[in-house]
Amino acid sequence: MEDWRKNKLAFAIFMGPATFWLLVFFTIPVVVIWIYSFGERGPMGQTYLSFSFDNYLRAIEPIHLKILWKSIWIGGLSTFLCLVVGFPVALGIAFAPDRWKNPLLLVVVLPFFTNMLIRTFAWIVVLGSRGVVNNGLGWMHGQLDWLFTLVGQPDLMGRFVPLGLLYNNYTVIIGLVYVHLPFLILPLYATLEKLDRSYLEASLDLGAGQWRTFFSVLAPLAMPGIVTGCLLVFILSMGNFLVPDRLGGTDSLMIGNLIAQEFNKARDWPFGAALSFAVMYPVFIFFVINALRARFKERARGRA
């Protein structure tokens, strides 16, 4: 039987539309923004192509590096929390009976049916001063106040003051974990679903405990899904500007918010483009190194 991948006509028919889409709607816009990063802002917000590195020199100023480092810290912590929460969920779905897998996967992807802006505003309803959490705490305070009044201590509880749960970095992390958790669960589930469970059974039969089997066998076998999911969540968390803008406070500015301000309010497209690529360059370098390492491993296996 002829391999369709060796048939140039069939390959062109199948890959042509996808290649055209990626070229026109992804590659060309990215190249245009990259060219803008070497430009210069005019007095009225115009962009002049001067091909200088001034914008990149501005991007590495201490004030901008501080925002970048904060974005890395918040993105890394959000990724870690997504991994802690998402790994048991993905493992539970992968090991669930077949009749339950599709409903459970539907629950994971169900938030995608709602706009992310609405999902973000939902946290304001939950954590606001008159939100679900504070209303629940206020009701509990009222019940305790009634109890202390009954025993003759009416002023012991005092007046209930709503907790300031919104507009801080912790709320931003909660929002990022909630928004990006499916992006870790799905690739991790895809890896765990293909896992050969005989390795786990052999580890347990040979005397290894549950925790040792988890860290020594299961985690290494699931590493491709862990790496893919963590990369997705980390990149998306660092570039997210909606969650910090809606849920964060005055000290919750992240690199995505700074880039959005440069493109919108400041109308400094060259500097905004330079900030964007200052974040993208390390990602590109990582993927190139990873691809070269995979190629070297494949060549080494071929020689062996």
Image: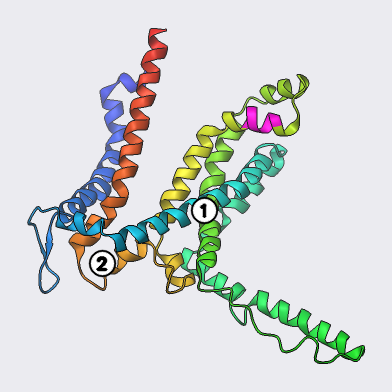
| Mark 2 and mark 1: Cα distance apart in space | 26 Å
Task: Give the residue at mark 2.
Answer: 262
Closer-to-camera residue (4/143): 143
Where does residue 271 sit, x and y in percent of width and height? 21, 61
Question: Is residue 156 left or right of 246 when viewed as pictured?
Answer: right
As drawn, the residue found furthest toward the front would be: 62
Q: Is 265 left or right of 102, judged from the image as shown?
A: left
Q: Quadrant of the C terminus?
A: top left
Nearest the viewer among 175 and 17 is 175
Label 2 Cα neighbours within 10 Å, binned few <14 / some 14-19 / many ≥20: some
The amino acid at mark 2 is Glu
State the residue at coordinates (72%, 20%).
202
- Tell me, for residue 47, which label it has, or none: none
Which region shows up in magenta? Answer: 212-218
Amino acid at dot 1: Leu
Residue 215 located within the stretch drawn in magenta? yes
Position in image of residue 181 (x %, y %): 55, 52
The residue where tag 1 is placed is 77
Q: Secondary structure at mark 2?
A: helix
Of circles 2 and 1, which is in front? Answer: 1
- Above or below residue 221? Residue 55 is below
Residue 1 visible within the image: no
Specify how the rendered protein is coloured.
Answer: rainbow
In the displayed structure, would residue 254 be above or below residue 126? above
Residue 101 x/y as whole percent: 66, 42
| The one of 157 and 230 positioned closer to us in this rendering | 157
Identify the residue shown where x is 71% and y is 39%.
Answer: 96
Give the mark, 2 or 1, whose residue is nearer the N terminus: 1
Q: Tell me the crowding category of disc 1: few under 14, some 14 to 19, or many 20 or more residues within 10 angstroms, Cα based.
A: some
Secondary structure of the residue carrying numbered label 1: helix
The chief SS type of the magenta part is helix
